[in-house]
Amino acid sequence: MALLLASPLAGAARAETRSSLAQAISALKGEYAENSGVRFSQKTRNGLGSDASLTVTHGKHRFSKTGVYASDITETSTVGDEDPELFRMINLGRDTYTQTYWDDLPKGKKWNHWRDKEGFLWSQNLVDALNPKFLQLISRSAEKVPTKDRYDGVPTTRYDGSVEVGHLGSRQAGIYYGKRIGEWAGGRITWKLWLGPDNLPRRFQAETLYEPYGSEQRADTVRMNVLYKGWGTPVRITAPLKKLVVEAE
């Protein structure tokens, strides 16, 4: 009898959780429609041991009807005991402006300009709490976890889960996923998501475990922790002055 009662209750709980993530997707699309924006900070750890890297990122995003339209981010990356590497990037539509410590620019120039550089651009296949398609993917495994956590000054509701994907990769814009392509490896994404009373993300954690390509390789692990704040506040992102920009080769 206990088993008979538990099964419908578990099914109802899963349905409620899927409904909650559906509301989060709707809330995000509402921000898209209003061309709103959000500020964020992120820590990403790649690998283990002395070769592990830590990247600390902060910045802001502005939305259009299709997602993140513009971004202004600053990153500091450190590998082991090496000196930190600095990176700055501004995206406006399909235009990207970058600054790196290794740039060899003409005198008086401070930015490289790139056009349609896919590796820099936000897209709808990223492991990203701002990506409705990713939220739809993870909603199948989501479980509600009782907490009293507060982020961005508001109470939050936490959801946990994990999902296997056929393909995993990374580029400057972030970690991306998709269907298996030939022998390219996939992996597992284990995640936690905190939603505010408005159903918008306030915190997101993900651990991506890449399948090793061969028996002699070990699995690669990337862990990220993202905090979001300032939903709905005006976000203004502008391109650098033209006189400071050079076309990237």
Image: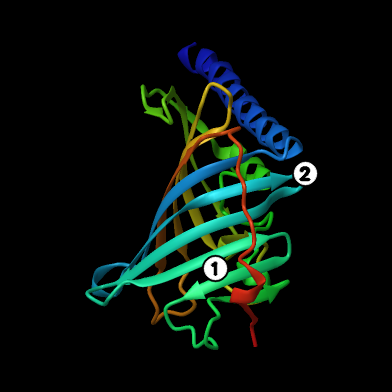
Task: In this rendered view, identify the residue nearer to me: 161 or 92.
Answer: 92
Q: Residue type at mark 1?
A: Gln
Give the residue drawn at x 53%, y 12%: 5
Quadrant housing the C terminus: bottom right
Q: Does residue 5 appear to the left or right of 120 in the view shown?
A: left
Task: Kindly report the distance in space between the C-alpha atoms of the residues bearing marks 2 and 1.
Answer: 23 Å
Q: Which quadrant holds residue 54?
A: bottom left
Q: Does residue 34 appear to the left or right of 38 in the view shown?
A: right
Where residue 79 appears, x then y in whole percent? 31, 73
Q: Secondary structure at mark 1?
A: loop
Which residue is denoted by mark 1 in the rendering?
Answer: 172
The image shows a total of numbered marks equal to 2
Up the image or down, 11 lies above or below 246; here it is above
Task: In this rendered view, identify the residue nearer to me: 151 or 183.
Answer: 151
Say whether residue 51 is visible: yes
Where residue 186 appears, x then y in whole percent? 56, 65
Up the image or down, 200 lies above or below 227; here it is above
Give the residue drawn at x 66%, y 27%: 23
Which residue is denoted by mark 2 in the rendering?
Answer: 65
Up the image or down, 18 lies above or below 44; here it is above
Disc 2 to disc 1: CB gap under 8 Å? no
Say whether residue 166 is visible: no
Q: Residues within 10 Å of mark 2 (few under 14, many from 20)?
A: some
Q: Residue type at mark 2?
A: Lys
Give the residue drawn at x 66%, y 36%: 28
